[in-house]
Each structure stands twice: as C-alpha cells, then as structure tokens.
Image (spheres, rainbow, N blue to C red):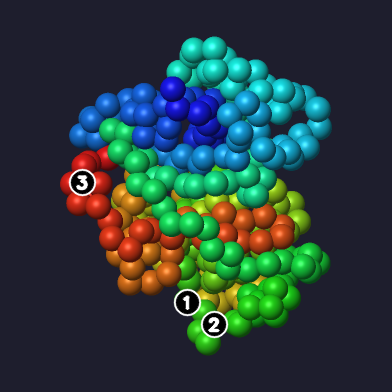
C-alpha cells in the first residue's frame, strides 16, 4: 500500500486522507466523461508523514480541530480505508501555503496535470493599505517595478470564492491588494490570469464598462464581472501560461508572499486530447 497522503481539493475546499495518490483520487472523485459532466478541480498535495500533517493549520477560532481530524482520517486510511475525509469544507483558508507540496489541474474525467514547482514572485513586508491607493503606489510599496502602461487584465479567482474580474494590477500587486484591502480582505487567495475575454459569461457591455472605469479612474483597481462557478466554464488552455507565450499558471498568495505554479514546458498530448 502507498503511504497515506493529505490532498486538498479546490474549489470544493476539502482535505482527504488517501492511499490512492493524486491520480487515483482524481479518478475516484470524477463524475464521468467531460462530454457530459462538469467537474474540473485543483488538487494540492499537503505536507504529511503518513500519520499526521507536517504543518500547523491556521487558527480558525476553535470551532473545529483540523489537526486532530486529519490524524484520525490518516489512521482510518492506515487501517484499510482508501479515502477518509479530514476536512469537508473551508480548507483553503486554514491550510498555510507552506504546507503545499505540489499542485495538479484535474479535468472532469479525472485526468491530472502536474504543474511545475512553485516559484516565489514577491515577498511582502509592508502592510499599510487604503482604498484610494493607485497601482503604482502598490508597486512601490511591495518593491516591484510598475508596468510602463497599465492595461486591464482579466483574472479568475478560484479560492476562497470564485469570480472573474478585470484589474489594472499585475499579479504581484493584486495578490497584495486582495490580502490587505479593508472590508474585502482574503486571508489567502488563489487565482489565474486569463488570455481570453470569456464573452459567454457576461454581456460584452460589462467588460467594456469595466475597462472604461479602470482606465478613467486611477484609484479603481478591480472591477468584478461574474460571480459564479467559473472554473467549469473556462477551459484550462485559456489560462495565461498554458502555451508558454507569457508567464502564468496558478497563483497562490497570502499577506507575506506570492507563489506561481507554472505549466509544464510541454503539455502531454494525452492531457490535451481529453475533454473536460
């Protein structure tokens, strides 16, 4: 039997103890063919020695004991179960980024694509934030060069909630802003940049109005377009970085840093030909 692992599945937000590995769990959870079902996900292998998590969960106020629950789930797998639920919900905001060991994109049929090793794109040491900051002010605060020209970018936020938005911020600037802005702060955020406008998801006027507002107001940094189940409506090949034409992939950030999990240099043909 393989050593038990802890695997977090997003955007569902659960953690499962399993002996099946990423690919085995992905196929077990799959609802079926990509032609008939939707069920894309991201699976994150978490640090674990087979019997207990090799990290401390972030404090949640004491309403559950995620460490003890994870130990119990791992014990169940060691006793013979192939999968045992450790956390059924809200895992993304309780698992620190330092616990991430590897990330995979999973299609509806259960096919998994391993992303590259995490690269740290930015480290955040300053935390004073207010709503009227400009993008250039944020860039200076986080020690990043401001872009010569600010063109609105399209982002899909995957966790802790799903939505599509336009922003005049770079990924490093957005991750800092999302984890610091008053009233709308995320403890952690996972997102990707999109290379297509995704007009099937909202009226074109919403995109045009958002672009206009971002270009006209220097203190306007983000403009939400769609709040719904976005991952299942946007193919992975629309993510910036998929074809290696620009830096991109899966971003994960908190108040202290931003990580990028890039696409592999070559996408396997077996992955591309499978729908879902």
Q: Can residue 16 be seen in this view?
A: no
Residue 58, x across and y down, in percent: 74, 40
Q: Nearer the viewer, residue 204 or 119?
A: 119
For residue 242, what is the image quadrant?
A: bottom left
Residue on which disc 1 sits? 151
Residue on which disc 2 sits? 147
Q: Say above or below: 85 vs 126.
A: above
Q: Which residue is drawn at 76% across and 34% down?
A: 60
Residue on which disc 3 sits? 270
Q: How far apart are marks 2 and 1 (CA)?
A: 9 Å
In contact (CB < 8 Å): disc 2 and disc 1: yes
Q: Which residue is drawn at 28% across and 56% down?
A: 267
Q: Is residue 61 visible?
A: yes
Left or right: 181 in relation to 161: right
Residue 48, x across and y down, in percent: 60, 35
Q: Is mark 3 on a helix, strand or loop?
A: helix
Q: Say above or below: 92 vs 205.
A: above
For residue 174, what is the image quadrant?
A: bottom right
Q: How far apart are marks 2 and 3 (CA)?
A: 37 Å
Numbered circle sitting on residue 122: none
The answer to which of marks 3 and 1 sits earlier in the sequence is 1
């Amino acid at each position: 039997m393989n050593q038990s692992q802890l695997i977090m599945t997003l955007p569902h937000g659960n953690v499962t103890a399993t002996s099946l590995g990423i690919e085995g769990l992905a196929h077990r959870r799959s609802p079926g063919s990509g032609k008939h079902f939707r069920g894309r996900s991201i699976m994150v292998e978490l640090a674990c020695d087979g019997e207990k998590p090799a990290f401390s969960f972030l404090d949640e106020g004491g309403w559950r004991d995620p460490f003890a629950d994870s130990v119990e789930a791992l014990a169940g797998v060691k006793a013979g179960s192939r999968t045992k639920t450790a956390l059924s919900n809200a895992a993304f905001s309780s698992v620190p980024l330092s616990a991430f060991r590897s990330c995979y994109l999973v299609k509806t049929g259960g096919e998994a694509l391993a992303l590259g090793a995490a690269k740290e794109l930015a480290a955040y040491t300053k935390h004073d934030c207010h709503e009227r900051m400009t993008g250039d002010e944020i860039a200076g605060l986080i020690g990043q060069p401001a872009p010569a020209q600010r063109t609105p970018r399209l982002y899909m936020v995957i966790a802790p909630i799903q939505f599509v938005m336009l922003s005049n911020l770079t990924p490093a600037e957005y991750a800092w802003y999302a984890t610091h802005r008053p009233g709308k702060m995320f403890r952690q955020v996972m997102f990707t940049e999109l290379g297509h406008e995704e007009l099937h998801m909202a009226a074109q006027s919403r995109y045009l109005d958002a672009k206009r507002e971002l270009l006209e107001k220097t203190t306007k940094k983000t403009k939400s377009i769609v709040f719904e189940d976005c991952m299942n409506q946007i193919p992975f090949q629309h993510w910036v970085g998929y074809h290696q034409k620009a830096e991109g992939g899966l971003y994960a950030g908190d108040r202290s840093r931003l990580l990028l999990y890039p696409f592999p240099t070559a996408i396997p043909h077996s992955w591309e030909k499978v729908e879902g």
